[in-house]
Image (cartoon, grey):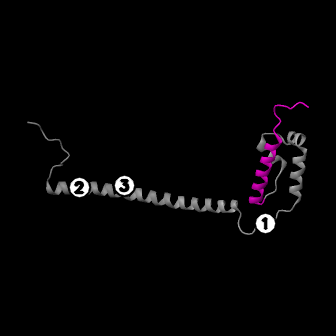
Amino acid sequence: MTRRVSDLPEALVRKHLQEVLDTCRETNTRPSVLMLARRLGLTNTTFRRRYPEVAREIADHRAVPVTPSSGPTEHDRLVARNAKLRRRNRDLAAQLALAAAQIQHLALRNERLQEALETASNVTSINRKPRLR
């Protein structure tokens, strides 16, 4: 039997199968042959032709009803955490914009007050370069 260059070792296919099954268990989804085939870079038909036993195993796993685990899954926790981080990020961005506007306002006000003070006291600015004699 001649092994084609594109054939993958059975151990590698089984390893990816286990990872797909673990992911499906965590996310309460059903595994599919297409999911595994894409992960291995194969078409659905090619995968089914080369690895019929693995395709039957996936079909058997699909036949078993998904039992929801008690409490939120890891995926659910990540989705909730992501939503919380996005809200926090929006709040911080709004606070940052407000702080920048306040700083800009204070800088302009300070400039006007400095000019008014110099005008009122008839004092020259320190920033002027002194003349060399």
Residue 118 appears in view: yes
Of badges 1 and 3, the one in the foreground is 1
Q: CA distance from mark 2 to mark 1?
A: 68 Å
- Tell whether 25 sits left or right of 124: right
Residue at the spot of label 2 = 114
Q: Amino acid at mark 2?
A: Gln
Closest to the observer, 102 or 30: 30
Residue at the spot of label 1 = 68
Mark 1 lies on a secondary structure that is loop
Closest to the observer, 123 or 83: 83
Residue 76 placement (x, y as % from top left):
69, 62
Q: Earlier in the sequence, mark 1 or mark 3?
A: 1
Q: CA distance from mark 1 to mark 3?
A: 54 Å
Closest to the observer, 74 or 81: 74
CB contact under 8 Å: marks 2 and 1: no
Q: Amino acid at mark 1?
A: Pro
Q: Residues within 10 Å of mark 2 (few under 14, many from 20)?
A: few
CB contact under 8 Å: marks 1 and 3: no
Outermost residue toward the left in this view: 133
Q: Amino acid at mark 3?
A: Gln
Which residue is located at x 90 percent, y 44 percent? 52
| Tag of residue 104 | 3
Q: Quadrant of the C terminus?
A: top left
Which residue is located at x 18 percent, y 48 percent? 126
Quarter of the rendering containing residue 113: bottom left
Q: Quadrant of the N terminus?
A: top right
The magenta-colored residue range is 1-28
Mark 2 lies on a secondary structure that is helix
Does 13 lie within the magenta span? yes
Outermost residue toward the bottom in this view: 70
Mark 3 lies on a secondary structure that is helix
Q: CA distance from mark 3 to mark 2?
A: 15 Å
